[in-house]
Structure formats: C-alpha cells, structure tokens
Image (cartoon, grey):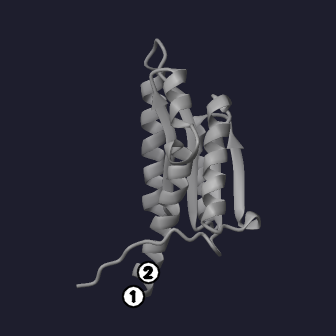
Amino acid sequence: MDEIEGQLSAAGLRLGVAVSRWNDLVTRKLLAGALEALSEMGAEEQNITVAWVPGAFELPLMALEMAYSGHDGVIALGCVIRGGTDHYTHVATECARGLMAVSLQERVPVGFGVLTTDNLDQALERAAERQENKGFEAAQTVVEQVSVLKTLKSA
C-alpha cells in the first residue's frame, strides 16, 4: 500500500495570493496570516505574487489567471458578511463554486480563505493571529496539497 502525506515546505514553490479589497479591514489580516505561514514554511518572497481584486466575486478569475500563469498553488482570501438581502448568498456561493472550478480545471490547489460570516465580529475573530487566522490555514492547506500532488505525480 502506498501512502502519501504532504509536507509543509513552500521552498521553491511559486504561489499566488488573490485578495479581495472588499472588507479590507478583515482581508488585510487574512493576507498577513497567509504571508506569515508562507514565510514559516520557507517560501521565498520573490516567488509570491499578491493580487488585489475588487471583491470576493472576482477571486475565481484571478485564481484562474494565477493557475494558468504557472503558479503551483493559489490562496484566495476574501470576506463576505451577511446583509439584509440575498446578495450575500449569491456572492459566497459563486465565489466558492468558481474557486473549486479553477482548482479542478487547472489541477492547481486553490486555498479557500474566504470568510462567510454573519457579522464583522465573527470575521475579525477568524482573521485573528496564527492558527485561528483562516489566511494562515489556507496557505498551509495549499502548500500541503501541492506537496501531495507533486509526490503523487513523481510516484
């Protein structure tokens, strides 16, 4: 039986981070968490591309362009806070669907660091420091998934 486990080493990886400007009080904290995780995993700064997009709905297109342009993995960071209309549901659903489509179509891991919360306090809680930060978590997930895929392809 072959068993493959990913490693948390970003050394030599080219990684993209797509970040939503909407709710940037939160997304800047998610970005800080993702960059901290990448640094701890040995990512070289020159191999990280950060691209800002207007909102969460625009994240899938940027993730697709990053995947298409040769990034080993993409971390998508955004924040959708429930409001008084159905807009929240449509944006959150289509963002998630689009990011999954990119990952499957391009065979490139896409980390889902998009918060979907009821209020700003919940979002800030999920953008706290270290492991509680969903940007940190999404970065680790992408690096581990890249490692598993590379190992599988070389087996």
Nearer to us in this view, 36 or 22: 36
Could you tell me which residue is drawn at 49 percent across and 61 percent down? Answer: 109
Nearer to us in this view, 108 or 129: 129
Quadrant assignment for the N terminus: bottom left
Q: Is residue 103 left or right of residue 38?
A: left
Q: Looking at the image, how many numbered discs can be counted on the residues?
A: 2
Could you tell me which residue is drawn at 44 percent across and 80 percent down? Answer: 151
Tag shown at residue 151:
2
CA neighbours of label 2 inside 10 A, class few (<14), some (14 to 19), many (20+): some
Determine the residue located farthest toward the bottom in the rendered image.
Answer: 155
**Tag 1's secondary structure?**
loop
The reply to whether callout 1 and callout 2 are in contact (CB within 8 Å) is yes
Determine the residue located farthest toward the top in the rendered image.
Answer: 84
**Tag 2's secondary structure?**
helix
Tag shown at residue 155:
1
**Percent x, y for residue 38?**
62, 60
Q: Is residue 147 above or below residue 121?
A: below
Q: Is residue 131 above or below residue 151?
A: above
Nearer to us in this view, 132 or 123: 132
**Percent x, y for residue 48?**
70, 61
**Percent x, y for residue 138?**
51, 52
Could you tell me which residue is drawn at 52 percent across and 31 percent down? Answer: 125
* Three-letter code, disc 1: Ala
Determine the residue located farthest toward the right in the rendered image.
Answer: 46
